[in-house]
Image (spheres, helix red, strand yellow):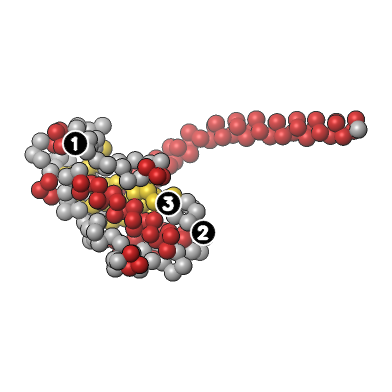
Amino acid sequence: MIEMLKLGLVLMLVALIAAVALGIVNSSTAPIIAIQQELEKQNAMSEVAASLMPDDSLAFDSLSIHNLENPYASCDELLQVVKVFLPPDTSRIGYVFIAYGKGYSSTLQTMVATRMDGRVAGTIILNQQETPGLGANIVIPSKLIEHLTGMTAEECRLRKDGGTIDAMTGCTITSRAVVNSVRQGLEDMSGAGLFYDDITLDEEHAEGGTE
């Protein structure tokens, strides 16, 4: 009986030490991971914005828009719109945003560039944890996302949902998550008056300033 108690105490002590060590490792690596993720986000933003205009001098400015709805609440994320422009001219040439959609086994993040007429200019899968060999193939542009280029919100639908985009074979959930999330972002941006003639001359009133 005593030996069993000793063994139990030893195992508990080992587990406690392992938990503390794991906590220390996580606390020390978390900032590094956060920095890496932000760099990946910035690189993806620059890459997808090149579909609007291939110029290394493109600049970005986050917008605060009062009447912009949030289609990504179910993913615990926000629709954040970034204006793209070419300095010194501050007139926008388009926008970039991240679309969030719940896939088969993860929340997929798609970086999207859209022109001023509301059409998709380019897309990049920023993050996904779908099934290797199946849903994970979403990162290959030719499998799905390159077919979004040039489409409006209304056109961003799978063929199974009345559109013209073919889902990846055996990956309807993943495909629908990406396509629908892009459409939802475009719809809410259009509803906020961000495309074409809906933009007011006074950007400060339309956007509530910049962050």
Q: Quadrant of the N terminus?
A: top right
Q: Can you say which quadrant of the picture contains the C terminus?
A: top left
Instruction: Return the residue at label 3.
Output: 102
Q: Residues within 10 Å of mark 1 (few under 14, many from 20)?
A: some
Identify the image quadrant of residue 58: top left
How many other residues sit within 10 Å of disc 2, few (<14), some (14-19) or many (≥20)?
Answer: some
Left-right relation of 50 to 33:
left
69 vs 201, nearest the viewer: 69
Q: CA distance from mark 3 to mark 1?
A: 28 Å
Residue 148: x and y in percent read 29, 61
Q: Name which residue type carries label 2.
A: Thr
**In x, y percent, where is residue 193?**
16, 45
Residue 104 visible in the shown view: yes
State whether residue 121 appears in this view: no
For badge 3, the amino acid type reads Lys
> To which residue does mark 2 refer?
131
Q: Please state which of residues 108 and 62 is positioned toward the viewer in this rendering.
A: 108
Q: Which residue is mark 1?
A: 207
**Position of 3 relative to 41 (above/below):** above
Q: Earlier in the sequence, mark 2 or mark 1?
A: 2
Q: Badge 3: how crowded within 10 Å, few (<14), some, or many (20+)?
A: many
Marks 3 and 1: which is nearer the front? 3
In space, the residues marked 3 and 2 are separated at their CA atoms by 13 Å
Tell me: 28 left or right of 95. right
Element on which disc 3 rests: strand
- Report the residue at 14% width, 33% height from top: 205
